[in-house]
Amino acid sequence: MPQAATRRGRPAAPLAGFLGRAAAGIGSLAVTVLGLLFVTFFIGRVMPIDPVLAVVGERASPEVYADARAALGLDQPLPVQFWYYLREVARGDFGMSLLTARPVIDDIARVFPATLELATLGVLIGVLIGVPLGVLAAVNRGRWVDQIARLVALVGYSMPIFWLGLIGLLVFYGILGWVGGPGRLDVFYDGLVPTVTGMILVDSALAGDWTVFSNALSHIILPASLLGYFSLAYISRMTRSFMLEALSAEYITTARVKGMSEWRVVWVHAFRNIRVQLLTVIVLSYANLLEGSVLTEIIFSWPGIGFYITNALLAADMNAVLGGTVVVGTIFIILNMVSDLLYKFFDPRAR
Amino acid sequence: MTAFSRLMTSAALGLAVMATGMPAAMAETPPNMLVIANRIDDITSLDPAESFEFSGSDVIRNLYLKLVNLDPMDMEAGYKPEVADSWEVSEDGKTITFTIRDGLTFVSGNPVTAEDVQFSLRRAVILNKTPSFILTQFGFTPENVANTIVGEGNTVSITTDKPYATSFVLNCLTATIGAIVDSKLVMEHETGGDMGNGWLKTHSAGGGAYALNEWKPNESVTMTANPDFYQGEPAMKRVIIRHVQESASQRLMLERGDIDVARNLNPEDIAGIEGEEGIRIDEELGGQLMYLSFNQKNPELAKPQVREAMKYLIDYAGMEASFLKGQWAVQQNFLPLTFQGAVEENPFSLDIEKAKALLAEAGVPEGFTIEAGVREAQERIEIAQTFQNALAQVGIKLDITVGTAAQILGRYRARELDVYVGTWGPDYPDPHTNASTFAWNPDNSDAAGATGILAWRNAWDPGDLTAKVDAAVTENDTGKRVEMYHDIQAEFRETSPFAILFQQKRQTAVADDVQNLNLGDAISAAAYWPVTK
Amino acid sequence: MREWLLSDAPASRRQARLGRLYSGWLTFRENTLAMLGLGILVALVICAALAPWIAPHDPYVQDLATRLKPIGTPGHILGTDSLGRDILSRLIWGSRITLYIVTLVALIAPVVGLLVGTVAGYAGGLWDAVLMRITDIFLAFPRLVLALAFVAALGAGIENAVLAISLTAWPPYARLARAETLTIRNSDFISAIRLQGAGPVRIITRHIWPLCLSSLIVRVTLDMAGIILAAAGLGFLGLGAQPPSPEWGAMISEGRRFILDHWWVATVPGLAIFTVSLAFNLLGDGLRDVLDPKSGGSQ
């Protein structure tokens, strides 16, 4: 649910109000992130999964085990551990991952662009199809077009993604050979373009290497379409409902009475009025996709942040979990705040 | 409304064009490149003194030389000279002196010297990581290595605390921890007295067939051929191991020619792909054992008749013929076949009536409830369910708890699980590796905390077996030694709270043109340097 | 009867309330898809209730000799799974687990959300700030991670999976309830009640909660599909229901190994999840049209 749509602002001078809210927002952002850190940290430490085992393996002797435990600082009391952790984070150091044997920050710099790339393409697909579908459904309310749009969207809501993913892979990759298989690139294209952003589509475009670009596109298109389908479901339903509200407004009736063409009524008048609301919905689906979809990532061998965090969590690699959660959580909060502010700034009714 | 319909149609069309307009995947991998799909999310370090996971061993075997090594093209021959040209055993049987081969170099260009050998072995002992027990069981400690592992001129001598069977010591040196690292290069990257451990986790410093390009966690490992490899530059200039979790995905990738080798196909996918043109199924015996163990802390399970009854409540043949088909074969002894001393006697089979009689004899005809811990892995869950099904027929209720590896293992090591469904892989190619964990437990008290020993984890005191295992390891007469392991296993099979079930059979689907791929049989890890296409 | 219900001048409160419900039902009935959804759910409940009588086999009985039989095998209409268990029977028994999950989550998450949201909205000030900050923290968590962490902490199992899912599901309800409360709080009728001497607890429980209910119900119904899928997702990762329980998500997870050669083992429970999720979505969508005045009822 877009929080913007459910909050009521107090009347104030637009700009001052905006700045004030921004400042308050940053304050609450800090509190939320701190809370996020604390909860994650706490969960990590009470979980009955032993992080030491992840490091030393099944056969460690008691001495090896004790050494590793001390090296991880786990012999310290909980509050002390949290304090040390905060101190390091304040310095920009998220610590080392136990599983990957490298700094968490490097890991995130490697896995997050993969998720970002996938989520961006996914939400693009969702918007490009979802918005027209929603408008179409609203305009044809109650007619068969509406029903079909409803069905298409709800099917998207209701499909287990891992099942759809495997079937999609089987059909489009295995049988038809239209798209690339699991992974981000065919192996022989690996490392051909210099890493700038970590997003292969962007990097290869920057390097002007269109062979790599098209290979990367062939790999990303299937998982992105899948994710796109899911955000499409949400976006089209919300578009429909906003549109219905806008179309029932008086000025629309007036416009119709004036004999304006239906196309103009819908797109120029009604649609323009729902732009901001729609934007918040889109930002929200984007934020959700940026969490990374573990299941999609597993099926498509996509080395994204969802899989990274899950894997780390299951082995109690808490530095990695904390780092990943903080990054994902912060992005979520910021995106939310931005949509909130946009909403309040642009939509006169919300003030 | 036509405008919207048109918009919709064009959007859909656009997507379809985008999808179809893309080039189909290439039909095959380049001729000098080997691409392998495998699950590599278990790798946490590529430092040979630390690495202890299957996929890590597969990588490290190709990066480093060892004093003595196994020949992937002639595994039955056992260890052969590599960095060591030859060796001599002192009269008291405690000191082995290796002569270092001339003219070997590391990938860095540095020569391989006695000093590197001394450094590598001492380093493994001093760092004291998990696999260090493979060396420290010979009495090496961080304090005494200066006297027990000594390089002089072009020789290195190691002195053990007891006169162990020479084959036992040398077999241990073929394990991952016996890898010889480039001491100069490693020490250049030392930080905070870690002997280069932090750096070596993600880099290689060896003189083996390959050098590590990059290990991207949960994504891929890339290796480049070493042009100066002493056996000649490998035919595959590049080896790429790609992490692909799902069996179905691996199979599709092999069918489309995007990979050469699929290592984790399940029996159904093997059956499905078998006979397809251009694909071959390689089979070799692996070293892993699947077993059920019964915690002796549970008063019911501690009764000898109950232990025995359990072994008759397992549908060995049924499982072998169905969901484990082709990948696990019945083996009821703790030494995997091809190991010295292995036996093929498998006396147990599913026999509900016999089990009922045994339970009645034990005084528990009305049954009881126990808990089994199972790691989240489909075949183990199915084994547990099959067992659960048989137990239900004699009135015993088995609750299955599925969890992540770390979770279940933690409880198992804490002696909390009644029943554990697990696997065990040998650490080095000598019978002692399994004997010393299944049938050896000198101190069964909780205080001993011997969490590395399976017998201890199940709170089982093997009695005189402990002494027998100790005796077998110092026996230098091979014939006698084999005899001793036969005895130990015969007693173990009848009395132990372990039901050994199966031995792993590796089924690997490979593209037809790939030749000479050995994945290590039961005793070692994968070797890529002999591979040709 | 019909006339009594639709009377323009109801004689009693009860008549008015029932009348409103009835006219809502009439609207709802016109929505074919929503009726379809309701029908499917009713069928599901019947199926779950009658499981012991309509399931052709014991869902737990294994037979390794007849494993992975295809759809249409005599005696096993939907085939058998990896251990030779009848898929149809497992599906029927599994409907109980699905209903169990759905009911429990529906009882926990919205209630927690309602409580937090109305208290925050009504009390305002510090209460509001603290409660909403907590809500934000939970909202900002990657959801599956939070669920995973709790399942990992509490141990795998269906009850814990339900708890974990509820834990991730309540924050949006809290936000919704708070927003509703804020609009109601300052309305005239609440002021009137307050003047009559009603305390905050009474106002919240007797007057604010009932008014929040309709939008919450709509939201819960629409979220049900997500909840079933989340439970299935946990099952997929091996952290949901424990074997040999015929939970649908776990069944997909077991069957996905055979998806290329024995597709029905994963597809049948996949379709079941899909059908029920779709039914909930259709129902929720229909309910929204009836209950949510914003989308403008057609009457």
Image (cartoon, coloured by chain):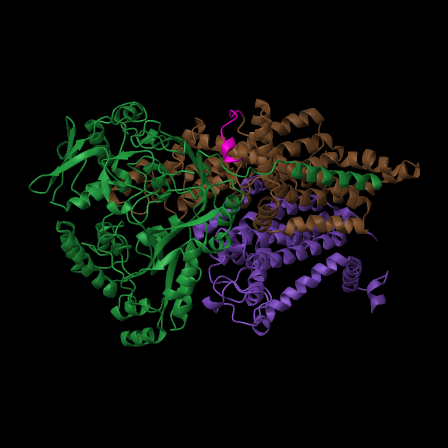
Chain colours: A brown, B green, C purple
On screen, residue C235 above or below C58 = above
- Identify whether C246 is placed above or below B42: below
Q: Residue at x 21, y 41 (%)?
A: B135
Query: Hey, which residue is sitting farthest right in the picture?
Result: A258
The picture quadrant where one finds residue B71 is top left
Which contiguous range is marked in magenta? A186-196
Is C213 displayed left or right of B105 in the figure?
A: right
Find out whether residue A191 is within the magenta segment.
Answer: yes
Q: Is residue A179 magenta?
A: no
The image shows residue A178 at horizontal and vertical percentages of 62, 41
Where B74 sits versus B340, above or below? above
Residue B99: x and y, percent? 16, 32
Quadrant in which the N terminus of chain B appears: top right
Residue at 40% x, 73% y: name it: B393
Where does the image place residue A44, in percent across and percent down from the top left?
42, 43
Can residue A35 be seen here? The reply is no
Magenta span: predominant SS is loop
